[in-house]
Amino acid sequence: NAGVTQTPKFQVLKTGQSMTLQCAQDMNHEYMSWYRQDPGMGLRLIHYSVGAGITDQGEVPNGYNVSRSTTEDFPLRLLSAAPSQTSVYFCASSFDRATGELFFGEGSRLTVL
Amino acid sequence: KNEVEQSPQNLTAQEGEFITINCSYSVGISALHWLQQHPGGGIVSLFMLSSGKKKHGRLIATINIQEKHSSLHITASHPRDSAVYICAVRSRGAQKLVFGQGTRLTINP
């Protein structure tokens, strides 16, 4: 049982490049979400999914795209990276959206030059 | 005003001291989470509460639904407890979590 696996751990991009952060869980969790963590801002929700084929926007969705084709995977795509997207990104999952315990990936530190 | 407020923002204590971190929220909730993040590290779930009190080792979490307040206590604190502690709430009927800003705890030997 690997829990939540998030890759890559570190990435440096140039402005305008695109990339995908991968997130996979093997706990059959319905709910998956992506957050960004910036100094002094706490964790902010980017996008979330309550099941395969269902996604919705969070607090700061602009510049990001997600899909949920399977229960296990929830990739986050940066369409055209900007310096404002320099941050630490966390993927999280829980069994259900209401009361499930949260499981986080190890985080991905992204720098956009 | 943020929906979730934590206090204090920073806390420094000596090894062995009893620690209390507070979380106040302004909405009706279905669950409250306490999370721990070590420097440069990932985020670990400590507790999920919807009522009452939970204990795990030296950590105790309590919640008062009527007062919209939760506390995280650490007994016999140790330098390895040094971390950021984050409170997060899930509003009733909502599909997303709202996070507090975190409390940075430093325990000196």
Image (cartoon, coloured by chain):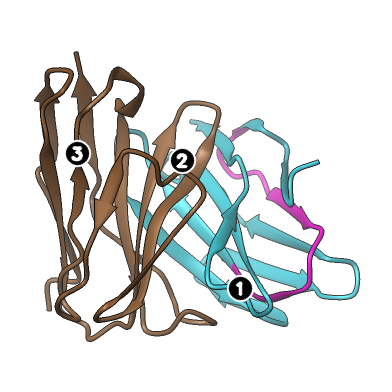
Chain colours: A brown, B cyan
Left or right: where does residue B82 sit relative to residue A10? right
Nearer the observer, B50 or B107? B50
How far separated are the C-alphas under marks 3 and 2?
A: 34 Å
Position of B106 relative to B85 (above/below):
above
Disc 3 crowd, CA 10 A, few/some/many (<14, 14-19, 20+): some
Give the amino acid type for the residue marked by disc 2 in the picture.
Ala
Task: Identify the element where label 2 is drawn.
Answer: strand
- The answer to the question of whether label 3 and label 1 lie on touching residues, with beta carbons closer than 8 A, is no
Q: Chain of mark 2?
A: B
Let me know if residue A46 is in the magenta part: no
Magenta span: predominant SS is: strand
Give the amino acid type for the residue marked by disc 1 in the picture.
Ala
Position of B108 relative to B27 (above/below):
above
How far separated are the C-alphas under marks 3 and 1?
A: 28 Å
Which residue sits at x=11%, y=35%?
Answer: A18
Task: Identify the element where label 3 is drawn.
Answer: loop
Position of B19 relative to B70 (above/below):
above
Nearer the observer, B105 or A71? A71
Which residue sits at x=17%, y=58%?
Answer: A75
What residue does disc 2 label?
A: B83
Left or right: where does residue B47 sit relative to residue B11? left
Q: Earlier in the sequence, mark 2 or mark 1?
A: 2
Q: Chain of mark 3?
A: A
Horizontal and vertical percent for residue B24?
A: 78, 55
What residue does disc 1 label?
A: B94
Marker disc for residue A79: 3
Position of A20 relative to A105 (above/below):
above
Span highlighted in magenta in the image: B13-32
How far separated are the C-alphas under marks 2 and 1?
A: 29 Å
